[in-house]
Image: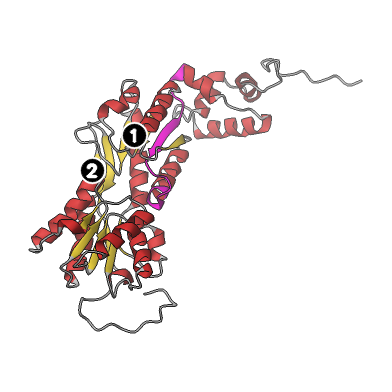
Amino acid sequence: MGTKAAEPKARNRAGKVTLRDVADALGVSKATVSLALNGSELVAQKTRDRVLAKIDELGYVYNRGAAGLSTGVTRTIGLAIHDITNPYFSEVCAAIEEVLSEGGRIPYLCNTDESLERQQRFIAALAEHNADGLILCPAVGTRLEHLGPMIEQGRPVVLIARDIVGAPLDFVGNDDRLGLRMVTEHLIGLGHRRIAMLGGGQPTSAGKLRRGGYFDAMRDHGLAVDPELVLDCPTSPDGGAEGLKVAMANPVPPTAVACFSDLVALGALSALYELDLVPGESVAVAGCDGIAEGGRAYARLTTACIQKAAIGRAAARILVQRLSQPDLDPQRIILKPELIVRGSSGTRLGAPVVQRNHSRAFE
C-alpha cells in the first residue's frame, strides 16, 4: 500500500488550514505571511503575490478579528449616513467603498435615519470591535462629545456633507451656500421676483448654508423675501410635493421655486402636475445635488450639481492618510457645484411659450 501523506503539522483539530501551514508551504516565516496579508510595505510585491496564491490554493481563511487583537488594526471602517435611500449618498458611499477596497479595507454601513440614538449605538459598536476609523454624515443634533468612543481611542473620524461646528475633524463637503445661490440667481436671471424656498429648515450645516445662499441671492438683487414662501418640509419627494402645494395656495403664489435638494424638487414637479401646472412654463423649479433621477424626470431638472463621487473619494483618502499620519492638521475640502440648466426652469419669464407635446420629456 502507498504511504499516506502526512497532514501539515500546524493544522488544527478541526482540519482547518492555519497561518503556519501557509508559511511552511512557502518556506517563509509566519510573520512574513501575516505582514503580506496586512498589506505591509515591508513585504515585496512578488512575495505578497506568492502568499495570496498559496492561501487560495490551500483554502486558508484569514481570521481578521484575531489579527486585530494582536496588531490593533482590523482594516474595518465605519460608514454612517443619515439617509442611505437618498441617491446623493448612494453615489458618495460607492466612491468611499471603491477607495477603501483598493487598500483591502472593509466599510461597515449604518443608515442612522436621523436617529442620534442609532448613530450612538453604531459608534459604540465600532469602538468595541476596534474599527480603524469612521466616516460620518452626522445625524441632526450630533455634537463632538457624541464621537467620544472613537476619538478617545485615537481613531480618526472624517465628516462628510454635514459639518459639526467647532469640531477639530477632517471635513469633505460641497459649497452648499454657493449651490443655492447659483440656482436662485438663475431663476432671478429669468425674470422671476417671487421665488419660494422649499426645505432646508433642519438645524444642520447644509440646511443653514443652502438656505443662506437663497437669502444671499435675493438680498443682493434687491428682492424682498416673503416669509410665507420660505417653507420647511421633509427632504423627500413627498415633502417637496406638500411644500409646493402650500406655496401655490398662497394668495400671491410664486412664479419660481428654489429647492433644498433634488429630491424635494422632484416632489415639487409631481405636485405641479397634480395641480395641472406645467414645470418651466407655469412655475420654474430648480434643485440642488445633481442626482441622476433629475435628468430623467418628465421635466428634466435644473440643479446645482454636486461632485458626489469626488466627496466620497476625498473622504476615504483622507481617512486612510490619517491612519498612518495621525498628527496631521485637520483638512477641510469644499468642492464647488456646477449649475446645470434644464427644462424645469423654463425660459425667461414673459417669453412666448412654445407649444410642446407633453407626452415627451422636455429638453
Q: Please say if 359 is above or below 6.
A: below
- Residue 328 image position (x, y, % from top left): 25, 30
- Asked if residue 330 lies left or right of residue 93, the reply is left
Q: Amino acid at mark 1?
A: Gln
- Name the residue tied to disc 2: 205
Q: Residue at x 67, y 32 (%)?
A: 57
Q: Please say if 357 is above or below 188.
A: below
Identify the element where label 1 is drawn: helix
Residue 301 at least partly seen? yes
In what quadrant of the picture does the N terminus appear?
Answer: top right
Q: Residue at x 45, y 44 (%)?
A: 98
Q: Residue at x 43, y 21 (%)?
A: 128
- In the rendered structure, which segment of residues is drawn in magenta? 70-90
Q: Residue at x 41, y 46 (%)?
A: 95
Residue 321 numbered tag? 1
- Residue 266 image position (x, y, % from top left): 36, 61
Identify the element where label 2 is drawn: helix
Q: Residues within 10 Å of mark 2 (few under 14, many from 20)?
A: some
Residue 84: say if magenta: yes
Residue 242 numbered tag? none
The quarter of the displayed image where residue 215 is located: bottom left
- Asked if residue 141 lies left or right of residue 68, the reply is left
- Asked if residue 358 lies left or right of residue 54, the reply is left
- Residue 270 image position (x, y, % from top left): 38, 65
Distance between the Cα atoms at labels 1 and 2? Answer: 25 Å
Residue 158: say if magenta: no
Q: Amino acid at mark 2?
A: Ser
